[in-house]
Image (cartoon, rainbow, N blue to C red):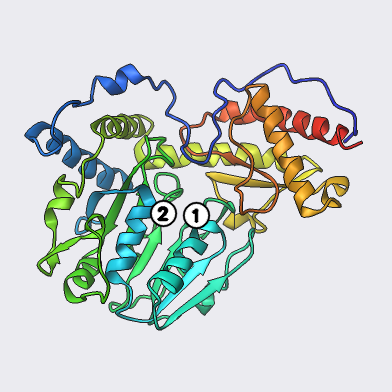
Amino acid sequence: MSATAQARPEIRPSNPCFSSGPCPKRPGWSIEAVAAKAMLGRSHRAKGPKAQLKSAIDQTKALLGAPEDWIFGIVPASDTGAVEMAMWHMLGARPVDLLAWESFGAGWVTDAMKQLKLDDARVLEAPYGALPALDQVRDDADLVFCWNGTTSGVRVPNADWIADNPDRIVICDATSAAFAQKLDWSKLDVVTFSWQKVLGGEAAHGVIALSPRAVGRLESYAPPRPLPKIFRLTKGGKLNAEIFTGSTINTPSMLCVADYVDALEWCESVGGLEGICARADANSAALQRWIDQTGWVENLAERADERSNTSVCLKVVDPVVAALDAKAQKAFAKRMAELLEAENVAYDVNGYRDAPAGLRIWCGGTVETSDVEALTPWLDWAFATAKSELV
């Protein structure tokens, strides 16, 4: 690649939104379509709005193909709130292993070690680009992990490494995996995600799904810690079943609910789970084809079977840039992102602040493959332009 800037490509992505959260809206989205579904100015506990919340819960469960005996609920504070309410309620009954190979997994480690101060908590870590040693996970310990590392672009290839044990609880943060990757429900007990990720819904709401075993833990274990109101899944020692029938803990935005319903309906229109997973696979495959043909860039994920099909992370391996110190590499990636945004071809693609220097391109199902393909020449252009500025 020449150090001189190259000509701007002629074709631009139709939609420049490649952010990993909040993520792109569905193709053809309009506020008018959402507003037509929104029950605004109404109590969320009134018959109509509550029915819409319950319908969204039921549609989510059906689309994701969850087992019949699982229950789903809408909870406050996005995926973060959903994960933390599960941790605060359930952890401490048994030893626990926590997996961290990117920033959000590391956040759950902080919660367990510094906030909950669990007695028997073990952390299995790996650097950005790799997974921890999954064969080292204890068979008799509770488990907390992210299915897809949103800030590293590394996902677990499957759940075969999780041993069956009826006494343990497996908490899975699936926020950038749900509706893009097929979860192995038989190996999990708590699954969480947010609307803002794969389906591009408006933020601030999370979904928590519980297996019968998770419900059993809630009703048999009283955690030795205060539980804020927005975390409380039980009442009088029993599951608060109303949360899983549309009665949310606090007031949801019915506009956000309508937006989520709109996204769910679109998901059904493209073939449900199979269709939207296939769209993400096609998008990430298009980006990977370009990576494989391009000398200055590599996928941050080292193994092909561990590469995310949603939050694809790129690292610059050009010798000139790689020779820069970490701060300068961060500045180079930021400059590339600025160039792309200034041309209105890609918004919000700089790597996560805690991740190694690079770019992060969202490839979830709401993105069109043609836009990914149109973006790649612009990535070459941004790299060449930023590199020419180093000389």
Q: Quadrant of the N terminus?
A: top right
For the point 40% across and 83% down, the residue is 119
Q: Position of residue 97 (x, y in %)?
A: 44, 75
Judge left or right: residue 190 versus residue 127. Answer: left
Residue 341 lies, with reference to residue 110, above or below; the image says above
What residue is disc 2 on?
Answer: 174
User: Mark 1 sits on what residue?
Assistant: 148
Decide if residue 159 is in sight here. no
Q: CB atoms at circles 1 and 2 under 8 Å apart?
A: yes
Q: How many marks?
A: 2
Residue 313, numbered label: none
> Camera-side residue: 81 or 141?
81
- Closer to us: 135 or 6: 6
Residue found 54% across the figure and 23% down from its top: 15
Q: How would you rate the neighbour count of disc 1 (Cα within 10 Å): few for under 14, some for 14-19, many for 20 or more?
A: many
Inspect the image, locate mark 1, and give the three-letter code of the amino acid beneath it. Asn
Q: Position of residue 192 (x, y in %)?
A: 35, 54
Amino acid at pointer 2: Ala
Instruction: Indicate which disc, 1 or 2, sits on the residue closer to the N terminus.
Output: 1
Q: Nearer the viewer, residue 344 or 318?
A: 344
Residue at 90% over, 29% down: 4
Helix, strand or loop at label 1? It is strand
